[in-house]
């Protein structure tokens, strides 16, 4: 964490990169995607397949 903060501080001070607030919605989307990938990885380890729900299929197309 300290390294990330130091890198961010360096980028802002040296390169003039401005801080951009990504927002809570984007953070929650990132967390959901991380959980989805973890579930896929666990299913693969257990020899299972994760299929999308009917609600996801209807939302996509």
Image (cartoon, grey):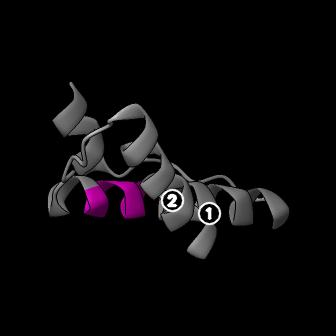
The chief SS type of the magenta part is: helix
Q: Position of residue 44 (x, y in %)?
A: 77, 56
Picture coordinates of residue 41, whole percent (x, y)? 71, 58
- Residue 4: horizontal and vertical position, in percent? 55, 62
**Is residue 42 visible to us here?**
yes
In the drawing, what numbered circle is on residue 34?
2
Report the quarter where the N terminus lies: bottom right
Describe the element under mark 1 as helix, strand or loop. Answer: helix
Task: Check the image and report above or below for 13 versus 9.
Answer: above
Res 47 quadrant in image = bottom right
Q: Are marks 1 and 2 in contact (CB under 8 Å)?
A: yes
Question: 27 and 8: which one is in front?
Answer: 8
| Residue drawn at point x = 21 percent, y = 46 percent | 20
Look at the image and tell me in which quarter the C terminus lies.
top left
Instruction: Measuring from the top left, give residue 12's x and y in whole percent.
Output: 37, 46
Was residue 32 drawn as part of the magenta stretch in this picture?
A: yes
Residue at point 45% right, 39% down? Answer: 14
Mark 1 — residue? 38
Q: Residue furthest top?
A: 61
Position of residue 2 relative to residue 61, above or below, is below
Q: Which residues are magenta?
A: 27-33
Q: Is residue 1 visible?
A: no
Judge by depth and name the residue closer to the eye, 45 or 13: 13
Q: Residue at x 17, y 63 (%)?
A: 24
Q: Residue at x 17, y 37 (%)?
A: 59
Report how many numbered discs are placed on residues in the image.
2
């Amino acid at each position: 964490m300290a390294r990330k903060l130091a890198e961010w501080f360096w980028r802002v001070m040296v390169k003039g990169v401005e801080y951009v607030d990504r927002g809570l919605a984007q953070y929650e989307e990132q967390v959901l995607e991380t959980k989805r990938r973890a579930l896929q990885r666990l299913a693969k380890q257990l020899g299972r397949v994760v299929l999308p729900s009917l609600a996801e299929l209807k939302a996509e197309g």
